Amino acid sequence: MAELRDLPGVDALLAAPEFESLTAAFGTQSVKDVIRSVQTQIRNDRAVPAWAASIDGWQKTIEAHLAPVAYRSVFNLTGTIIHTNLGRALISDDLWDGIRDLVTRPANLEYDLKTGRRGDRDLVVESRLQRLIGCEAATVVNNNAAALMLVLNTFALGQRVPVSRGELIEIGGSFRLPDLMTRSGCELVEVGTTNRTHLDDFARVASDAAMLLKVHPSNYHISGFTTDVDAKSMAGLAREHAIPSCVDLGSGTLVDLTRWGLPKEPTPQAVLADGIDLVTFSGDKLLGGVQAGIIVGTKTYVDAIKKNPMKRALRADKITLAALDATLKLYEEPQQLAETLPLLKTLTLTSATLKSRARKLSKALPSTWQHAVEASQAQIGSGALPDKTIESIALTLQHAEHSADEIADLLRSLPTPVIGRVHGDKVWLDMRGAQPLQDLAKTLGELAP
């Protein structure tokens, strides 16, 4: 058994070839600090573990300490396409390559090349949105919650805003609309009931309201004996009282998804056509781009939003704006969108393609693993179309020596973690996320027999 005096020096470990990948992945100082921490624990325990006798043992131990606090790419085979916890919408390699210079080199982010003076950082994306949506004006912040907060703070600071009780949503991480409204500096006025709200409910409080707000139920669904106030009626009531109206779409799309056989979802264009003054929606959900909060609508109101000091605190950076503009550009060729937008391409994969993926992956598994190709259901995720699923195909895994939960643990511990879902006594790997297929096959082949 090794003695404490036999522990290798920190510099000796860092110089070992096995540690090159660790320092490249996590940083030299981070690796050094963990080595020291582990060695201190060993000395406190006065016992040298068996793994400490080899460089390989040190490499695996240090990596195990660092891996939980590092961003890593994973395979999302959960069956939730836009997974909030796994980065939401995918960005294509072609799109990223197209904006590389804008990200890595100086760019005219807030510089007017004609005048040589300071410019508007939202101008490029705003122009694109004006063309695509037909809106008078637009602006961008870092996410949709920020977009709604900015709207509320601009037009209802210290004032009352009525919202239907059936639309008092809770979004991810236990963040709730009533709390967001309070932090925005306005007073929530609940109207109607959970399942039924009428225009009269809003009309009774509209004279004391600073604005009217409608929240699209993008992350939940209430069915049965229900009534809500449509956007056109709300817009008309707001005009009667000379106050702005706003619809928070949450997960917004710029195209009619039914053309690809997908469930229908309202578009900003349709909401604005109903007379609503402002619409907010996300950039990284059904739009299929990066995290962003987009506000479109009447120029007078958008201009007021841009002048709010909070806009600077919530503004998007150059990477977000460059990627968002590149994503929006894809919508200028809607007939090609199912091939150019990764999200839509994933949602429209055929059953034959999904089955082919499953069969190819099953061949990569060690022979001791039990597997089957089974029909499944996928959901769009991140609050988009919560009551709808789409047909899919899954590769299910079982093992004589492991429970389903243990299999899920093994999959997450692979060099590139594979994230599936446990259902019954199996782990289900949904094939809509099985890309890049060759890399995934290689990764699954590294499962222990």
Image (cartoon, grey):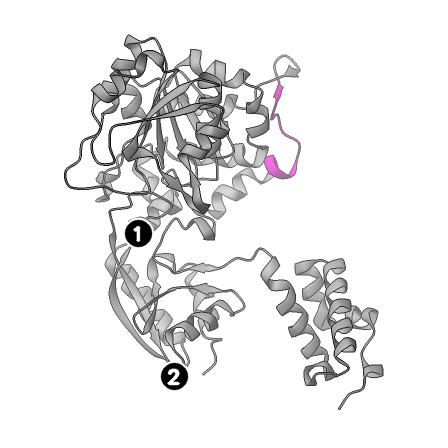
Residue occupying the point 54% across, 68% down = 415
Q: Nearer the viewer, residue 152 or 380?
A: 152
- At a point 33% along the width and 39% down the height, the residue shown is 336
Q: Quadrant of residue 383?
A: top left
The residue range painted magenta reads 101-113
Taking the magenta stretch, the answer to whether it contains residue 108 is: yes
Task: Give the mark nearer the N terminus: 2 vs 1.
Answer: 2
Q: Is residue 314 left or right of residue 406?
A: right
Of residues 104 and 335, the one nearer the viewer is 104
| Amino acid residing under circle 2 | Ser
Up the image or down, 191 lies above or below 242; here it is below
Residue positioned most to the right: 5
User: Which label number is shown at residue 143?
Assistant: none
The x, y position of residue 374, in whole percent, is 25, 68
Please determine whether, in this image, residue 354 is positioned above or below residue 344.
below
The answer to whether residue 177 is magenta is no
The CA distance from mark 2 to mark 1 is 31 Å
Q: Which amino acid does label 1 sit on?
A: Gln
Residue annotated with mark 1: 379
Residue 242 percent coordinates (x, y): 34, 8
- Secondary structure at numbered mark 2: loop
Residue 89 visible in rendering: no
Q: What element carries label 1?
A: loop
Figure disc tally: 2
Tell me if 119 is positioned left or right of 341 in this view: right
Q: Residue furthest bottom?
A: 1
Q: Name the residue under label 2.
A: 367
**CB-based contact (under 8 Å), mark 2 and mark 1:** no
